[in-house]
Image (cartoon, grey):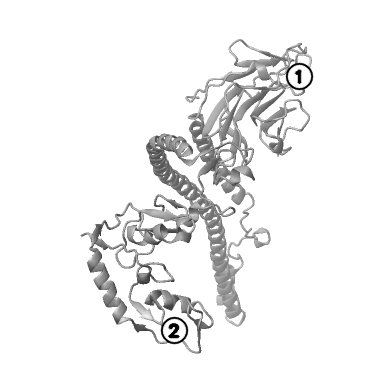
Amino acid sequence: MACANTSWSEENFSCSICLDVFISPVTTACGHNFCRTCITKFWDEQVRYKCPVCNKLFNTRPELQVNIFLSELLAQFRTSVGVKEQPCVEPAEVPCDVCTGTQLKAVKSCLVCFTSYCKTHLEPHQRVGRLQKHRLVEPMDRLEERMCKKHDRLLELFCQTEQVCVCQFCTEADHKSHPVVPLKEEYEVKTAQLGKIEAEVPQMIQERKQKIKEIKDTVELSNKDADREIAQGGQVFTALIGCVEKGRDEFNQTVKEKLKSTEKQAEDLIKELEKEIEDLTNRSSEVKRLSHTEDHLHFLQTFRSLKDPPPTRDWTTVEVRPPSYVGTLRRSLDQLEETLNMEMKKLRDAELKRVQQYEVDVTLDPDTAHPQLILSEDGKQVHDGGVVKILPYNPKRFTRYTFVLTRQSFSSGRFYFEVQVKDKTAWWLGVARESIDRTGGSRGTPETGYWTLLYYNDVFLFSDYTSVRHPLRAGLQKVGVFVDYDEGLVSFYDVEARVHIYSATGCTFTEPLYPLLGPCDHDEGTNSAPLIISPVNQTD
């Protein structure tokens, strides 16, 4: 539906406040006419009520009455000049800021009034002299945001140095030495960049969806692993509880059997004593009766049977000894310990097999090797040569400690490698972060980026100087090193014995980690054997 628009040329039909054609004209007591909305808003902002034209003061706020005569004249005037069609504003267009009710499409924006006008409401800017000096531009929305706050000028340029929109005056002051271009030119550059970003966004979204899937898969796998661990752990603990309960029952049974044997011995002795007491009591009765008889023949015949007392035991040496339980509990616990050790061996074996699944193939990096070390051609062996070679300077090389790193590094996940230490009397093994001090100016601790195990004189020492208690077998053959980067875990294993040596937990890794080997000094040939990176044999 087309909206009505009327233009006029007589100033008598214009409101002196809004300079627009009257809308619902009202008259003040002094005879001046205004739009009802204009004069109402004007008085709302005043402390004293006066006429905007003649400045007449009113003691109280006047009651406004519609000027019926002027309203009829306006209607006739609009009819006489005819009605022209003007399109209503569309969603993507700038609306007129003056229109009430249905807003019309703005045809110009005033940079002085900060207002956009439709064709009808623009008319005063084309007719009134002081308004004709205002700068009109193509319709713009949010005009105040488009103006320079400092110079009250249109933001028409773009400063490439500070990446902000500026006005012409800004280029002569704060941005005088900065390269500036028209907004359109920078718009085209940024639009091209936006197009590239827009093209990249779907790929980024896809990558993140894939990452979500990976995370969900990891969580699902973790749930399965946790369920399996709980099930296996439940079986182990159930078996251990069964062993403990069985040991307890056997211990209780042993104690009860000893007590029962003692009770049976005591019961038999008591019965024997009671029988002797009964026999002796009967003899005593017979003696008493015989002592009171005066029949000589009967006395002599009866006395003959009394001269031999009934057989009795010498009870002076008979005693019931309480059972001894010394060693009973210990023997039960020894048996339980043996059973637990067997179960622990199974667990250690299972643990080692589990970490061995994360085997990585690593080779030694000659650029990092101390000048005294000698590496094999395949990068799998290292030993101390006893002589410091003259080599070109390399910031990656160790210059104080006889260490060497691998070519490979790891920044996430888990990894495991094994090193043969056979016939060695001293060595270093572990991992180190990339930024460690290669010159040896700082001690090799976790704080400085070392997580290593030192073996020397049959003693293990972790890099934080923790003494590691480990029952050494005769002739340590091979050591396994396992690292869980995300969990902050470094573990060492005696591979041949399937025994855990030591674990450092709660480590913080923020850089790539490199496996580290240190064969130590050859010590006049007693420690000349090499450290050898060996393939993992999970069938051991």
Residue located at (51% from left, 40% from top): 343
- Quarter assignment of residue 220: top left
Residue 348 location (% of width, % of height): 53, 36
Instruction: Identify the residue position indicated by label 2 in the image.
Output: 30
Residue 147 on image: x %, y %? 51, 53
Q: In this rendering, would 354 be left or right of 307?
A: left
Q: Is residue 178 visible?
A: yes
The residue that appears at 49% across and 35% down in the rendered structure is 350
Crowdedness near tag 2: few (<14), some (14–19) or many (≥20) residues, C-alpha within 10 Å: some
* Relative to 477, residue 316 above or below: below
463 or 205: nearer the eye?
Answer: 205
Question: Nearest the camera: 342 or 5?
Answer: 5
Mark earlier in primary sequence (2, 1): 2
Q: Alpha carbon of mark 2 to alpha carbon of mark 1: how far? A: 113 Å
Residue visible at 50% across and 22% down? 537
The residue labelled by disc 1 is 521
Residue 34 figure quarter: bottom left
Q: Amino acid at mark 1?
A: Asp
Q: Is residue 147 above or below residue 199?
A: below
Please state which of residues 43 and 407 is positioned toward the viewer in this rendering: 43
Q: Disc 2 residue type?
A: Cys
Closest to the observer: 306 or 96?
96
Q: Could you tell me which residue is drawn at 68 percent across and 22 percent down?
A: 396
Indicate the secondary structure of the residue bearing disc 1.
loop
Between label 2 and label 1, give the one nearer the viewer. 2
